Amino acid sequence: MNLSQFKVGQQGIIRGYDDPLIAGRLMTMGLLPGKEVQLVRKSIMGECFYIQSETMVLAIRRREGEKIQIEE
Amino acid sequence: MKKIALVGNPNSGKSTVFNHLTGLNNKVGNFPGVTVEKQTGIFALPNDETAEILDLPGLYSLYPNTEDERIALEVLLDQQNPDFPDAVMYVASATQLDRQLLLLTQIIDFGFPTILVINMIDEAKEKNISIDFTRLSTQLGIPVLGVSARTGENMEQIASLLYQIPVQKLAAPFRYLSENDLSIVEIMKPVMGIENPYRTSLIAHHFEKLTFLSAEKKQEIDEALKQTPLKKLDLQVKEIMGRYDKLGLIFQSAVTQKREKNALSQKIDRWLTHPWIGILIYLAIMLLVFQSLYSWASYPMDWIDQGIGACSDLLKNVMPDVWYTHLLTDGVLAGFAGILVFVPQIVLLFLFISLLEEVGYMARVAFLFDGLLRRFGLNGRSLVGLISGGACAIPAIMSTRTINNSKERLITILVIPFISCSARIPVYTILVGFVVPSVTVWGFLNAQGLVFMGLFFLGIFAALGTALILKFFIKAKEESFLMLELPPYRIPHWRNVMMNLKNQLGAFIFNAGKIILFISIFLWFLVSFGPGDSMELAEIKARNEAQISQLDSKNTENAIAAARIEASYAGIMGKKIEPLISPMGFDWRIGIALITSFAAREVFVSTMSTLYSSGNQDEDTETLRQRMASQKDANGIPFFTWPRALSLVVFYVLALQCMSTLAVVKRETNSWKWPILQFFYMGAMAYLLSWFIYAIWG
């Protein structure tokens, strides 16, 4: 499954990315495959995700979340 | 002088380091051809040597996916670039060391002499993170120093490290290239002639985006690379993983830390990033900002006005009554007033923005509003500009600097002047009285208040509608994405806030200010001179007529002023454009006011009172409105009918009647193309709607 299918509060492990460009950006920021990630909350209309991985907090768009493969 | 590039991730505390090192010895400009801000500063080394420090934008990598990354890559790749550094000072945060060193490994592989400055060691101590600097230094092969730019701890040691850079041994490459990349480098070597293999491979992967390469060179590279299959993006992911794997090992041996989530930031974010409570809190903060620009700033603005007015009176008294006195008072001093009057609002707005940015709140705003505003081609941060545009477009347009997507920033800049600013209020006040009487409707609402509100909404609709249209016409330079780090909340550092204020003010006064001064002098020329002796003749004629109708001295003065402006170049222009503006119901007098109020919209009121003067100069709006109402056209019918007034006020809602806005848009977009385009499309919209209104009801 991908991150956009998560419910608020759900956690999982990143398996990989479906888009090399998004992969490049998120990985250079430190969101690497194998790390745990939690969907903490969504913005109005579910357009943006507030996600947390270890000490890092990121804001991403739903479209970007669709490209992150997650294993529960 | 040595050139040092300051490199680091966003939120590494890089600008705190920069501000601490360079103090007031810094200047802000733009990288050539783009709107990315460029900060440089001078820094003293031992033995009377100095170094120039260039603060590159905060980056995560040297892969050119954003404009910031592309510019940084070009500065570090192109040896002909005037900013090409002799060495790199890399800043990373001690609290997030595990994921802030990827970019450093790229810098090392570029072959720059590099020092690693680990910032925020005071915070790291509090969080029980212990770092073995010696081990880190031997493993990376570069000098490593732990500092706190906030408290100043160890900051004095940076100078001696930078001083020793010429004798510093270069680190071995951090990561050796893959076989695929090595074969590419072999092919590229004769084309580029660069020894460093990692630089060569990055050029091979990204040459299409690099502007320092000529078209012929790109063609040559393209030809050369046809010999080998190049799997660009997959390779990039592999490369990142390879770098992280090695970094992970180094990190394990040199750093011990517990991975704790920031509990306080989490608690605050429960409210501040709540889907709708967060939006309400943001709007409340913006209301406070707006209130401060609208009312608090008015006191210092009045002082500036009065101060310049006093200077001008003083000069008029001590200097002879000749043209150069008037040039000095009505041209140059008026121009200075036109620049300085914006200073209070700019200071206040940037005080708020820098504080909110430093605290870490602005990144949250992007999260809250990204979804809503993206539909309009705007950005979460555009809201700061759009809301403060209700006070004044000048600071509002400057505030868009915090938007890092160039397309969203440009659209924000182009639509901000539609929002009704405080300078339009005097114009509305005069004219709304012609449109509706001051009566109460539906029991509690004032009809004039409703029209006022309608004018404000017209501006907002125009802004959003235009943004929607521009979204399809402006090409994006880069992929639009959010993927934004939300840093932990922290107490703002006063030095960063003050430096930002100083830089923004300096940029406004010395760049936009020049243009404002020039236009102000030009406008003075237009109203002060006419062809030949036409103005003198008009004055004599007016004086004679005043004598015949036995006007008192004050009324005589005013009649002369009106006659002179009619005979001036501005008057001639007003009459020349009358055929053009008459479809909107405007006559040549309004034409003159349109020209003079280009200095600032509120000048409309003073020009109208000069042109319609038969009474006092310093009268209030009510008497001016009465005199305008008593104006008759050639057929003896009152000139200011409500359709004419409505057409005029709508024109002022939509038209870009403000030289300072043009100057600041020129400064912020780094080209004349956008302010000119903006002037014409806003003018065209104003013309069409005013013409439409006057054609229907006029």
Image (cartoon, coloured by chain):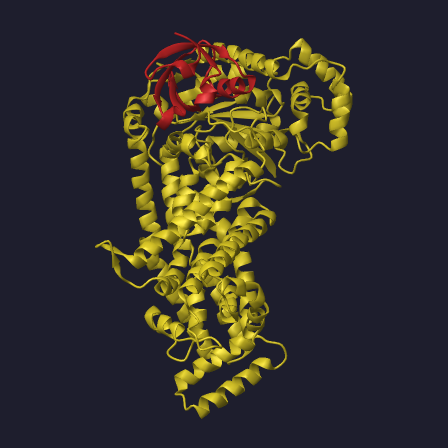
Chain colours: A red, B yellow
Locate residue B497 relative to residue B247 in the image: left or right: left
Q: Residue B320: where, in percent of width, then height?
A: 51, 81
Give the residue at the far front of this rendering.
B696
Q: In which quarter of the image is residue A61?
A: top left
> Where A65 falls versus B304 (above or below)?
above
* The furthest residue to the left: B443
Q: Provide residue B260's location: percent of width, then percent of height.
A: 33, 16
Q: Which of B659 and B183 is in front in this view?
A: B659
Where B507 falls versus B125 (above or below)?
below
Against B593, is B559 above or below?
below
- Picture quarter with the N terminus of chain B: top right
Residue B513 in view of the camera: yes
Q: Can residue B149 be seen in this view?
A: no
Query: From the viewer's perspective, is residue B686 above or below residue B264?
Result: below
Query: In the rendering, at what x and y percent does residue B336 appear?
Result: 48, 62
Q: Nearer the viewer, residue B658 or B335?
A: B658
Total numbered badges shown on the rendered structure: 0
Q: Residue at x 58, y 75 (%)?
A: B529
Toward the viewer: B76 or B634?
A: B634
| x and y percentages locating residue B229 in the rendered image | 71, 13
Measuring 52% from the left and 59% from the top, which residue is drawn there?
Answer: B516
